[in-house]
Image (cartoon, rainbow, N blue to C red):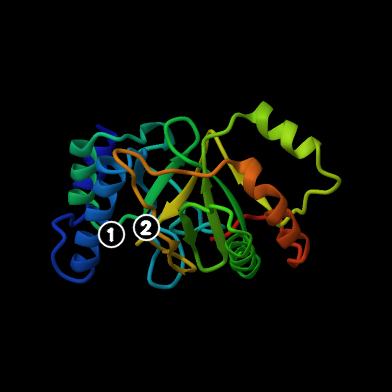
């Protein structure tokens, strides 16, 4: 009920400024759940000044995080997703990572582009890649924390520029707009049958670690 009452205060008809993008976002969200079977939910909207439409004045990921409903509400139900984007047509699409959805490995944008080029040079399958203004996120098969810990334990060094988006995490999907700018596909999903093939994290980790070691050390906050 909180979600319904909150949305009654907004103009959710998709008309006027942003209406075209609203239709694009709704279509993309429905494609995520209908064709790719990825659980999504609407996120907090980015304001025109780059801030966030959430209660936190110092939000460090404006327009790139869930707000109401919370992350646990992520679903693959097209009826729920269609309703969300009818009443909130400009909300960014948030992918709930892990479990039923892909996990991801991410790097700062320049390092991510370099890593993708190196994977292509080696002939390694990279899978879908989300290009946000400040970070690139490579989607991979869902992994569990013990598996990730085993992979990282075998490495001599793990750069702090490399981030992991697993169970309980989230990331924005195209064509969302965050406070930093628009999110796009550097490499679009290529469905086969009723699923999108994803690489294993283990098959990408060596290249991403090398690229991450060459990237400037990031600050303490993950930005998009």
Distance from the alpha carbon under mark 2 to that under mark 1: 7 Å
Dot 2, crowdedness within 10 Å: few (<14), some or many (≥20)?
A: many
User: Would residue 82 appear left or right of 190 to someone viewing this image?
Assistant: left
Residue lying at the far top in this picture: please name it: 146
Residue drawn at 48 percent across, 52 percent down: 127
Residue drawn at 27 percent across, 38 percent down: 3
Residue lying at the far right in this picture: please name it: 156
Count of marks placed on residues = 2
- 34 over 143 or under it: above or below: below
Q: Position of residue 14 (x, y in %)?
A: 16, 60
- 211 over 66 or under it: above or below: below
Q: Position of residue 146 (x, y in %)?
A: 68, 26
Q: Which residue is mark 1?
A: 90
User: Would residue 76 appear left or right of 167 to someone viewing this image?
Assistant: left
Residue 73: which quarter of the image?
A: top left
Question: In what element is the residue under mark 2?
Answer: loop
Front residue (pair 21, 121): 121
Q: Are marks 2 and 1 in contact (CB under 8 Å)?
A: yes
Upstream in sequence: badge 2 or badge 1:
2
Q: Which residue is mark 2?
A: 45
User: Would residue 177 appear left or right of 170 to someone viewing this image?
Assistant: left
- 181 over 162 or under it: above or below: below
Front residue (pair 107, 16): 107
Residue 107: which quarter of the image?
A: bottom right
Dot 1, crowdedness within 10 Å: few (<14), some or many (≥20)?
A: many
User: Would residue 49 appear left or right of 78 to someone viewing this image?
Assistant: right
Which quadrant holds the N terminus? top left
Q: Position of residue 101 (x, y in %)?
A: 43, 37
Question: In what element is the residue under mark 1?
Answer: loop
Determine which of the numbered discs, if any, sits on residue 162 in the image.
Answer: none
Residue 183: which quarter of the image?
A: bottom left
């Amino acid at each position: 009920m909180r979600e319904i009452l909150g949305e009654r205060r907004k103009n959710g008809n998709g008309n006027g400024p942003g209406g075209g993008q609203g239709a694009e976002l709704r279509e993309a969200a429905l494609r995520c759940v209908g064709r790719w079977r990825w659980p999504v939910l609407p996120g907090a909207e980015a304001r025109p000044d780059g801030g966030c439409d959430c209660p936190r004045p110092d939000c460090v990921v404006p327009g790139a995080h869930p707000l109401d409903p919370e992350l646990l509400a992520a679903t693959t139900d097209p009826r729920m997703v269609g309703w969300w984007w009818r009443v909130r047509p400009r909300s960014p699409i948030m992918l709930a990572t892990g479990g039923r959805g892909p996990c991801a490995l991410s790097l700062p944008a320049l390092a991510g582009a370099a890593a993708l080029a190196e994977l292509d040079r080696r002939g390694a399958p990279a899978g879908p890649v989300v290009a946000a203004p400040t970070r690139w996120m490579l989607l991979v098969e869902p992994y569990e924390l013990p598996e990730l810990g085993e992979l990282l334990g075998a490495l001599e060094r793990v750069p702090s520029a490399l981030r992991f988006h697993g169970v309980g995490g989230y990331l924005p999907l195209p064509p969302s707009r965050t406070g930093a700018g628009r999110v796009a596909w550097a490499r679009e999903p290529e469905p086969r049958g009723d699923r999108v093939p994803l690489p294993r994290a283990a098959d990408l980790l060596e290249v991403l670690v090398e690229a991450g070691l060459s990237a400037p050390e990031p600050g303490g906050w993950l930005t998009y």
